[in-house]
Image: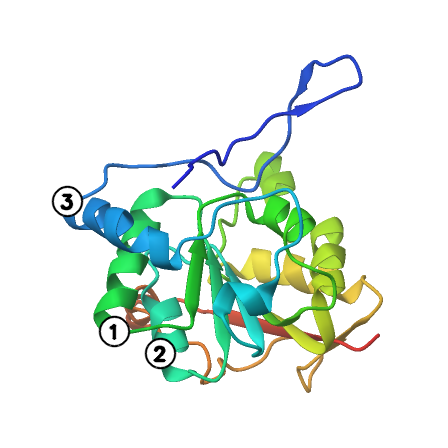
Amino acid sequence: MINDVISPEFDENGRAMRRVRSFVRRQGRLTKGQQQALDDYWPVMGVEFQQEPVDLAALFGREAPVVLEIGFGMGASLVTMASSNPQQNFLGIEVHSPGVGACLGAAYEAGTENLRVMCHDAVEVLNKMIPDNSLRMVQLFFPDPWHKARHNKRRIVQVPFAELVLRKLKLGGVFHMATDWEAYAEHMLEVMNSVAGYKNLSAENNFVPRPESRPLTKFEQRGQRLGHGVWDLMFERVK
């Protein structure tokens, strides 16, 4: 696995430019099991970043609807979704290698064959590797809320990102977001409502109940016991 998540951008004079990113690279220490999973299963399920569009049918060895998940954490819910929906292809992107290792190990244990994973900046992957009009769904669950006002600009859900996702979705494809920060949920709603080409799938034009397609995580179950809310948003590409 080539772990080059932080890739500099340069101006016309060759000077590196500072780029605002939506994540902090907290690599942490790989456990023995995570490292073993990376060694053993990355060659089978791992996808290296490249500068040109990838043939998704060739990547999975078949034609099937593709679901892209951004920031899958340790991968438990992603593996559950892939295992429960063998008729779909799942591509997960995560910048932290311990989570990638954990996901690979869980996928192997579950016998999941319709899952591929990447360790790279999702915005670069979308821009460079994912063909336009190719995805059935993009999932963004519990992204960093960057709750301090001075950090709000780091939130991944901004108008340019929503427009980028729109281009990658097929007509009728859905951008599904979830957060446990109400202020971020309201921010997401404002951003999505401002981008032409999306239709809010909420009957009240705000949030939707958690669909069965999104597994309830241990983190979310704990939050529910503590009385914390979770907000789901689903927007369909309609043009």
Could you tell whether 187 is left or right of 46 in the image? right
Q: CA distance from mark 3 to mark 1?
A: 19 Å
Q: Mark 2 — residue?
A: 83
The answer to whether residue 177 is seen in the rendering is: no
In this orientation, which residue lies closer to the viewer: 82 or 161?
A: 82
Q: Which mark is residue 110?
A: 1
The answer to whether residue 162 is seen in the rendering is: yes
Residue 128 in percent (x, y) is at 67, 47
Residue 101 in percent (x, y) is at 29, 51
**In the image, what residue occupies the spot 40% across and 76% down?**
81
**In the image, what residue occupies the spot 49% across and 63% down?**
91
Could you tell whether 187 is left or right of 142 in the image? right
Q: Do residues under tags 2 and 1 come within 8 Å of each other at their CB atoms?
A: yes
Q: Quadrant of the N terminus?
A: top left
Q: For the residue labelled by badge 1, is the local secondary structure a helix, a strand or a loop?
A: helix
Q: Earlier in the sequence, mark 3 or mark 1?
A: 3
Three-letter amino acid code of the residue under disc 3: Lys
Q: Do residues under tags 3 and 1 come within 8 Å of each other at their CB atoms?
A: no
Residue 79 in percent (x, y) is at 35, 70
In this orientation, which residue lies closer to the viewer: 120 or 205?
A: 120
Q: CA distance from mark 2 to mark 1?
A: 7 Å
Q: Earlier in the sequence, mark 2 or mark 3?
A: 3
Three-letter amino acid code of the residue under disc 1: Ala
Q: Mark 3 — residue?
A: 32
Residue 118 in percent (x, y) is at 46, 51
Q: Quadrant of the C terminus?
A: bottom right
